[in-house]
Amino acid sequence: MKEFNPFLKKFSKKHRRVAVVYPNRYVGGITNLGLQRIYFEINSNEDYIAERFYTDVFEGLRSVESGAYINNFFIALFSLQYEEDIFNAVKILKKGKFRGKTIAGGACVIQNPFPFVGIFDRLFIGEVENAVTDVIEDRHVEGLMPYSMKRRVVELDSEMRAQIVSDNAYGRSILIEIGRGCPRGCRFCIVRQIYSPARWRSADEIVSIAEANRDLAEKVAIISPSPTDHPEFKDVLHRLKDLGFHVSPSSLRADKFDEEMAELLSDVRTLTLAPEAGSEKLREVVNKGIDEEDILSAVEIAKDVERIKLYFMFGLPGESYDDLNEIIRLVEKIKNTGKRVSVSINPLVPKPHTPFQWLPYGGDPSKNVLDSIEEMRRKRKYLISKLRKIADVDVESIEKFAIQTVLSRGDERVGKYLDRKLTLSRIIKSELAEFLDHHPFDREFPWDRINMGYRKSRLRREFEKAMETAEVELP
């Protein structure tokens, strides 16, 4: 693991040690610019020193910087980006015999902090930039539970111009967050709500950050939930290319991909697209905003691309086997262009703060939990049997995504089940099974206690519109 680390700070006895823990693998954690920002802010304070922990480096028990054991730190800050990271976090705390103060933040905490109340001393809801020291010192800052139940939102600024450059998920590259939040209205996606409003860095600032790190890498990875929605996206690409950088966006929208963009991204070998559903009807249900013509046009334009990577979901409301066959047909069409095709398919997790938060796992409100799971298993088996003949295919586990659903939609009761790995059978036999079920409109969700800055009535209208399109009757 080779790093180019401009933040490296020597420990002295006057410093109080802060553990910055990413309870997952290094390759993903080093691409998390929010975590880099926390690390930067702590090490910019003369009273503290931050060191990083990852599960695949000393099992998360010793730091990257000095190899110091986590139980030598007075406080540990955890970033929970994926629901199942909580199991790694619990393991690190127990195995590391940590007795200091613990604070958790990140996307999973923002969406619903209540499953983690019994695990950590404090939880932070929102964006922590310029408030990290306040959080460590337990001041009554917005977003820090239990003092505040309001999501904290910040302006994007350019204070952190230097960064740790390493062989990350994008290869050795400079990471630049060009935008936060998303202006789109996909009904399955939580980003629009938990990172609203959508904000963009200016082209000048993006280029300036790249130039400041020019000697560290020849590649720039531009990060955003929807990079092509940046109002100056093509200008950014032109200017970075003119500086000699290779550019890799985190994702692309098929309806925004044109000949000019293909030329600007000519050194990109894999084009990643997310149709989400195979049929036009279900793409309308999820409000994806693209059609099959957009997808096929993007594939045709991407002449220099060697591989097309496609993301789909199943377990959507109103879904039939005809809709699954539309996924297979679309993959076949793309395969017939001569490209190598890989397909990733996930079960829908009905996330908090989305119009689908009232749905059950499996997408069919008329089915009970056990019947829904069995139907999902049949659909998964069907998709694998058909798609593996024409593409590299990865269809995620029904059990794994059921667990994610419980961890994202649960309340304080979830915490007492996190002492060991949560399994689907354990969920079904317990009170947690209700979090996989359909929820009526009069249900108060745990996350309703958080001031997220939107009206729940708007989500309900979107949900009703989706159910009408899907031709699904609610019980």
Image (spheres, rainbow, N blue to C red):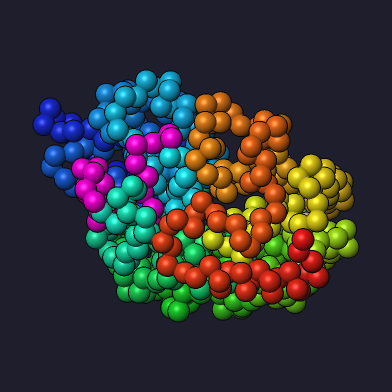
Q: Main secondary structure of the magenta part?
A: loop
Q: Residue at x 63, y 46 (%)?
A: 435
Residue 384 visible from this viewpoint: no
- As drawn, is 419 to the left or to the right of 72? right
Q: Residue at x 29, y 57 (%)?
A: 142
- Looking at the image, which is closer to me, 416 or 143? 416
Q: Which residues are magenta?
A: 118-140
Q: On screen, 285 above or below 109?
A: below
Q: On screen, 131 above or below 417?
A: below
- Looking at the image, which is closer to me, 74 or 299? 74
Count of numbered badges drawn on the protein: 0
Position of the N terminus by quadrant: top left
- As drawn, is 327 to the left or to the right of 92? right
- Looking at the image, which is closer to me, 395 or 10? 395
- As drawn, is 394 to the left or to the right of 83? right
Residue 135 point in image, percent of width and height: 26, 47
Residue 6 point in image, percent of width and height: 25, 46
Residue 118 visible from this viewpoint: yes
Q: Please identify the quarter of the rendering in which residue 381 is found.
A: top right
Residue 38 lies in the magenta stretch: no
Q: Residue at x 12, y 27 (%)?
A: 13
Position of the C terminus by quadrant: bottom right
Q: Residue at x 43, y 27 (%)?
A: 92
- Looking at the image, which is closer to me, 49 or 65? 49
Give the residue furthest to the front.
Answer: 442
Q: On screen, 365 above or below 93?
A: below
Residue 172 point in image, percent of width and height: 44, 49
Q: On screen, 208 above or below 370?
A: below
Residue 131 lies in the magenta stretch: yes
Residue 320 point in image, percent of width and height: 86, 60
